[in-house]
Image (cartoon, rainbow, N blue to C red):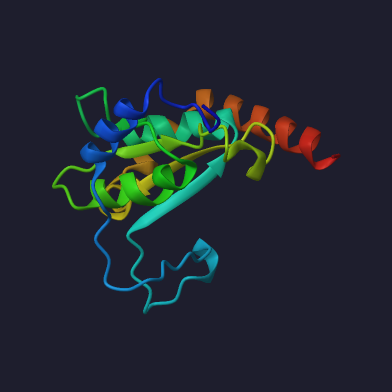
Amino acid sequence: MEGERYKQTPEIVDAWQKNIGPLPSEGKDIVFTRWDQLTEQDNPEVVCFFARPEVMSGLFTLANFDQSDPNGVICPMGAGCSSLIYYPWMEQQKEDPKVVLGMFDPSARPCVPLDIMTMAFPMKKFARVIGHMEESFLITKSWETVIKKIERSAALYSKD
């Protein structure tokens, strides 16, 4: 059978689709705004990062900083947009939301730059973790070493 072939059988696809359900909506539009262009009237529900591995390591560690559960970041199967919209929004509805690692969908990979993955924070989780930044690993020499690697990576990719 021709198609994406991301699941072994149509029956598995049907069962998977029953598990995820529709995304409730008040309208037909979803608005994406860059963080630096938000206004006081904006009320974001999800904060999405597109980043390379070293930056992801910081986001991942920060997402797990304030909890003993090692699964503060989840990686559910789905389309690239589901890791940016559906799953993070569904997590936002929970009392203790998890962060969503994504952009593994082979159909979406051509749409993002080389070596970029996504991490989407439900807003209530993001608000909580940014409050911990000044007491976290971000103030350590270990993170300074990672920052140097991030800068080297940025220099390499800026030549392209």
Q: Position of residue 54 (x, y in %)?
A: 57, 29
Name the foreground residue: 15 vs 131. 15
Q: Nearer the viewer, residue 6 or 97?
A: 6
**Residue at figure coordinates x 33%, y 69% from the top left:** 43
Residue 158: % across, % down = 80, 42
Residue 65 visible to the viewer: no
Question: Could you tell me if residue 43 is visible in this image?
Answer: yes
Residue 82: x and y in percent read 40, 45
Query: In the picture provided, is 136 more to the left or to the right than 35?
Result: left
Residue depicted at x 31% and y 55%: 123
Q: Say above or below: 96 vs 65.
A: below
| Observer-nearest of 8 and 147 | 8
Q: Is residue 45 above or below residue 102?
A: below
Q: Residue at x 19, y 25 (%)?
A: 68
Compared across the picture, whether 50 is left or right of 151 comes to left
Q: Is residue 91 above or below residue 5?
A: below
